[in-house]
Amino acid sequence: MSNRAKTIFIVILLCVLGWSVFRLADASRGAAQTQAVSSAEDDRVRVALSLGGDLTPWETDLIDDLSQSCAAQNFELVYNDPAEDTASWQLEDIRSLLEQDVRYLILCPSDNSMLGEVKTLADSKGVSIILVASDLKLAGECTSMIYINGYAEGELCAKALLNTYGTTRDCHIIEIYGPEGSPIAASRDQGFRAAISDYPNLHIMKTCYGGFSQLTAKNAIEELISANPKGTFNAVFACGDEDGLGALQAFKIAGYNPGTDVSIVSISGIQDTKKAIIAGEYTATVESSRHLGSVAIAIITRLEAGEDVSKLFAMPFRLCTADNLSAYEPTLY
Amino acid sequence: MKKFRYFANRSITQRLFLYFLLIALVPLIIVQGITTTVNERALTKVVQGSTEAEVGSALSSMERSFSSVISICDSIQNDATFQKRMRTNYDSLEARYSEDLAGDMDLASTIGTHSEIYGLYLLGANRLCCKSNTNSFISDDFRNDYWFSDTMAKRTASWTSFHEESYVVRTSHELFISYCCPYVDKATGRVNGVIVVDIEEETLTSAISQNMLEGGFFLLLDGNNEPLYQTKNDSAANALLPRVIDSISAAGSTQPDAATVLVNDQCLIVFQKSSITGWNLVGVIPMTSLNAAQDATIWLAVSVSALFALISLLLSSYLSDKFTSPILHIKTAMKAVEEGDLSVSLMPVGQDELADLTRSFNRMVGQLRELVNSVYEKQSQLRKSEFKALQAQINPHFLYNCLDSIVWLLRMERTDDAIRMLQNLTTLFRISLSKGRELIPLRSELRHLTSYLAIESMRYSRKFDASVEADESLLDYTSLKLMLQPLVENCIYHSISLEKPFIHIRIQVQDDGDQLLFRVSDNGAGMTPEELQALRDKIAVKPQIRDASAPVDPYSESGGYGLKNVNERIKVYFGEAYGISIESEKNVGTSVTIHIPKMQEHDL
């Protein structure tokens, strides 16, 4: 075989090889490629939501509210259900959300220390941050801040206990604190402690960890009840309603009559707490930041319209007691 | 045949190349063909087998969840506290809410570690609402919801299809499947509520592997073969659905614990019915996906074949060149030898047959070189001998003496003798020339000898006489030209002495089988043994390689020169077996014998 013939043969074989490899890759891609092509992009404004901690009724309500508000504005909401109650998980979650071509990030941080890094990431992607926080100093870290006044909410809880016990009757309080590093829980705690400091009959006997979880709080309270004589505690302050409901269960199991023997106050205003208040087993809850989702989407709508928006939006709150909760409210969390 | 001839006419390199290529490619193509065919069938079986396994495994996992749900509902039905709660008519919101919260705790503890259950709800006709999770109810009165009233009316438990959001509590855009079970009052047998159990879609379908063949999908059909859930919701999957459902409906009742396989022109269907719910879990593999997978196998085989063919081609080319390279070198060297260059020599590489061939070639060329040199030397020697023989014949002294004798004969007016001498001299020179031939008939050789004897006898008539004896039948055999004259000349010049002033020279030619025997003998002075040995040695000395152009002086040779010359010529023409032998005795005489093969002119 001459060199020319060999060359032609080699070229033909290379062509066969190239073509077959191409077909192989094509065949392997198969239906996956078809599926990828079928997912068409749309040009709706994408709004990301990042939550820290377990999915509580307050957060479920926030998601519902955001979904309805986004649908009304033809925005697209993207979020992931929290898988872990850690700052590192939330950071990863934010990174993945920022890769999804979002324009706004509504951030409820589980830990304020992550804000610097999140801002850098968001700036690099041109994403505006709508921050949900209870620390006014953080207003500079975001496009706009939705302010939850945790401190005042804590003060309101103290006021509810003061209403029950007055200024003379002893109130031995168990304080259930929220997740470690949670800025909102910390500010509520500070507000409560500052408020009771003026009244010597209101004092914190014990503190325990609840972490915004019924089960955790219930177990913690059970331990305290069993470790102390009956009557040692007659009040509970919890940073979140879930913790307060856990305490309610623990006291009921231990034979207490919550509402009579023990006064429980907490913050959030979820449905079960309000039912407990109506049932006379719970003293009060501070309904916190209702319709936060609507407020966030209203801010984004104005930003999209090119309007100037305020740097700070303060969310309202109110004290719910047996006096002002007489029936089921369909808008309860 | 033409093709075979074409193939046979190719060079060894080309043929080797094609042999190697055929040896490499033919088995490769056959193996690839068989493998591809077998793989295609195996792939279908593997896909079918793995889908069967997936369907079986996923269904049993789902059934475990279904069983737990039913079991939990049974335990609530049989719980006295719950029976009492459901039987009670609450006269105040406070009392009902208090029972709700107590029921929440009990339901939460009933669920325990059943993580597959998202929520367990007990909803009474008395508006009791208990839940196992912390979610908020979407309503405080479900009595008008269709699923509630339907379950109450039918008094049978049922599974819903997948639905977004829970029917009972607020959730964040999740898919659920729900079990709605009537709560029967154990005291009256009346249905006084509904137990609802939510299972998240993710939880239920997590057992269904997503690692299916590309394009394939799983499908969950209810008892009426209505789709409840499918892992793929694209247009291709939806287009297959009617055909899949029709096929399953047509298949009728099947074994509940075993997968059923259906194949049509569009897809491969593997399905199994749940004994608890009556649902079918179906694995669907579109034929296009199966074909694509088979195509991938085929193209992989083609890629590998092409790659191997390419490697085979390059290797074949390399190997054929490597194997034939020594042969081509030998061929080139052979051509050089053919063109006369005997100086070529090849360097053998290795110890294989080709190296042996190279060494043999070198040996052959060496032997050829020696042979050519030998022939060249022999030819050179022969030419020299002939030249000397001729030169001896035209010895100027002999010619001068002859002419001088003729002059004296004429002066003495012996004209006839002079003419006879001239005629003999003429004959002598004519036969000497013989048109350049070396072998002449014996008749001519003897005539040449008699002419010489006639001339010499005129000059030395008182010193010798001679006789020639040859049978007439031998005269046509060939003889070497001028073979006898030097022998006779030696007799005349060396055998006549003072003691033997007259000698008789006898020339005999005899038939000796296949040889002719010549003997020239005299009764002259003879030789001493030492002289005889010296003469024999002189004759026996092999001819030396000498420069052919170097001048030869015949007068510098002693008396043995003529014998030596004749001996060499005989050996050159007839071989080493033939030649001269000498016998001599002092004062008795000398006899020289020659043997040559008996040949006639037509034998030459």
Image (spheres, rainbow, N blue to C red):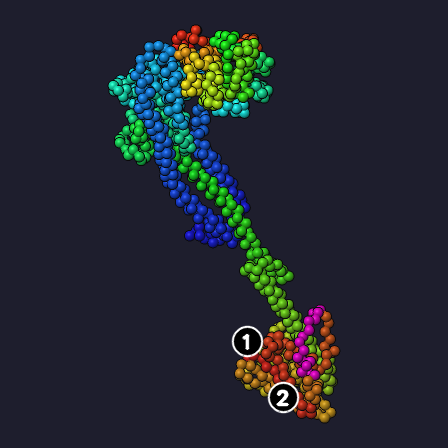
The residue at which mark 2 appears reads as B506
Compare residues B585 and A148 and report the one nearer the observer: A148
Q: Residue furthest bottom?
A: B499
Residue B531, located in which quarter of the rendered image? bottom right
Q: Chain of mark 2?
A: B
Q: Which residue is mark 1?
A: B601
Is B97 situated left or right of A1 in this image? Answer: left
Q: Amino acid at mark 2?
A: Arg
Image location (x, y in percent) of residue A282: 44, 13
Q: Where does residue B508 sit, x and y in percent of width and height?
A: 60, 86
In the image as oriented, which residue stretches furthest toward the front? A229
At 54% from the left and 23% from the top, the residue drawn is: A87
SS class, disc 1: helix
Give me the disc on residue B111: none
Image coords of residue B485 (percent x, y): 65, 82
Residue B144 shown left or right of residue A195 in the figure: left
Which one is nearer the viewer's eye here, A174 or A62?
A174
Closer to the camera in the image, B50 or A148: A148
Identity of the residue drawn at 59% across and 20% down: A116
The magenta segment is B534-549
Q: Position of residue B313 (x, y in %)?
A: 51, 46
Examine the image and state in which quarter residue B91 appears.
top left
At label 1, the amino acid type is Glu
Residue occupying the point 32% across, 23% down: B79
* Chain on which label 1 sits: B
| Quarter of the image that includes the C terminus of chain B | bottom right
Q: Horizontal placement of B406 versus B481: left or right?
A: right
